[in-house]
Amino acid sequence: MTEIAAPRAATAAPARMPSTLRVGLSRAALETRMFFREKDAVLFTFSFPIILLVIFGSIFSDQMEGTGLSVSQLYVAGLIGSATMTGFQNLGIGIAMDREDGTLKRLAGTPMPPAAYFIGKALNTLLVSFLQVAILLAIGVAMFDLELPSAASSWLTFAWVFVLGVLGSSLLGVAVSSLPRSGKSAAAVITMPFVVLQFISGVFIPLSQLPDTLARIASFFPLKWMCQGFRSVFLGDAGATLELAKSYEPGRVALVLGAWLVGGLVLCLTTFRWKGRRDG
Amino acid sequence: MTTAVRVRGLAKRYGDVQAVGGIDLDIQAGEVFAILGPNGAGKSTTVEILEGYRRRDAGEVSVLGTDPGRPTREWRSRIGVVLQTANDVAEATVRETIRHFAGYYPNPADPDEVIERVGLTDKAGKRIRQLSGGQRRRMDVALGVIGNPELLFLDEPTTGFDPEARRRFWELIQDLAHQGTTIVLTTHYLDEAEALANRVAVVARGRIVAEGTPATLGGRATAKATVHWAGGSEETDTPTKTVLELSRRFDGEIPELAVIRPSLEDIYLRLIED
């Protein structure tokens, strides 16, 4: 039996709690460090879009009538859209795993502000998506005659489509992470809708070749609008005639992505579970 | 003495199962308090309510003066929680993880000192997934104490340990207790409760069936002793007298003499059977 010791005195001056931003940045650093240490996952995360680009770009190298654009350039824009949405998949699976392996439960027992966890995930996703996009652009330029836009306004469009897209799809990923019943089933549950969405949103197949119904379904989800935004940046005015609406509709892109950002946030705040289903 | 934990009439039900059915507890600051009980007796539910993980259905609960049903960051920074199982942060090293968690608290302990205290100094640069079960558990304790908690919860901390690892783990807990940390521990192991705890409560069927020091729990100190010898045994309140009589009868040495008091385990098994 242990002797009863004099109780530890409460700390004299109530010290200030660390700020949410500081803890969030520290989470981002830890998440990023851990992400890059899982070498196999890193390799596949980055090589997947590259391989797709090289395959599709090599198969479909023809010009598109009357535009002076090649099909491979279309794929670069589509795959950048898809890379911008990786957050959906990474967070949907990653958070389901965090729930399963005890990360969330442990964090819930500490004074970490809940927002710091999401800041960490969001910054990590921004970085990973940014690197994916940078690699895709480099390969597009080197192998598939992609011309980077020179106008500052194009890069501005790129920036807001990218940031709105990453954050919106990350929030959506956070929300869907509650769907899988366990960490093990997460990959299957979350990959399927993502792949379907890629096929109907114009990543692999131009929207003009899809049945109307599918194109209409896709227009409720952010990926279609992200791809459209990136086409406006990388294909320029010449490509606008290929769009269903004969225009890139930047206003609607911003509106839909903005709506998903707000909707995703509400969904996260109302449905997020810090505990697993078997955890009561 | 000040009260660290005060519980009155705590109740919790899951569907048709009354997991906790009216528990009262008082745990003093500076005390090591063990909650014993079989699986499903309600001890983890009770502790998780105290830790602020679960909502209660009824009763009054105060932990360090705060209702854990409404946890605040300030309150969380004063308690430490060591969970039953966790396999998180596998790819980070011990030192990285402990430094990172230190950043959550207003008055953290020195990370290297904590690593030293849990005996992981030579593993500090190792990835967490490379640690053995016992080392992993000590890391969990390090994360539980990095914020300099006034109150530490340990949920079945040594399940699956080999005897040597368990002994080392006990020393770590005793060390924390000496420094004045209040410790609330659940365990299956009676020797663990006996080695560590100032007071023990036995929980069965959602209620506390006995409470006391390990030496007196369930009337252990006053229970009848059994005297065994070659050819007989006798239950008695006065074993010394019996031994003297036997010594006379055998004219000196009594063959195969043993005087046995009920062990904590005997008392415990009797308590949870009722």
Image (cartoon, coloured by chain):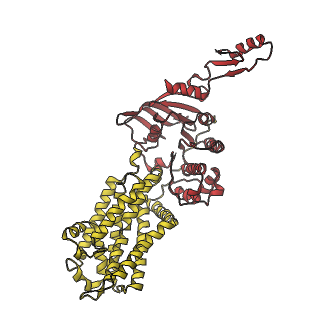
Chain colours: A yellow, B red
Q: Nearer the viewer, residue A261 or B15?
A: B15
Q: Quadrant of residue B66?
A: top left
Q: Nearer the viewer, residue B45 or A15?
A: B45
Q: Nearer the viewer, residue B102 or A118?
A: A118
Tell me, yes or no, if residue A217 can be seen here: yes
Answer left or right for A35 relative to B253. left
Rendering coords of residue A205 (x, y %): 28, 75
Tell me, yes or no, if residue A111 can be seen here: no
Answer left or right for B230 relative to A225. right
Answer left or right for A32 relative to A151. right
Q: Quadrant of the N terminus of chain A?
A: top right
Residue A257 position (above or below residue B246)? below
Rendering coords of residue B247 (x, y %): 77, 14
- Identified at 62% across, 27% down, the residue is B263
Q: Quadrant of the C terminus of chain A?
A: top left
Rendering coords of residue B260 (x, y %): 66, 22
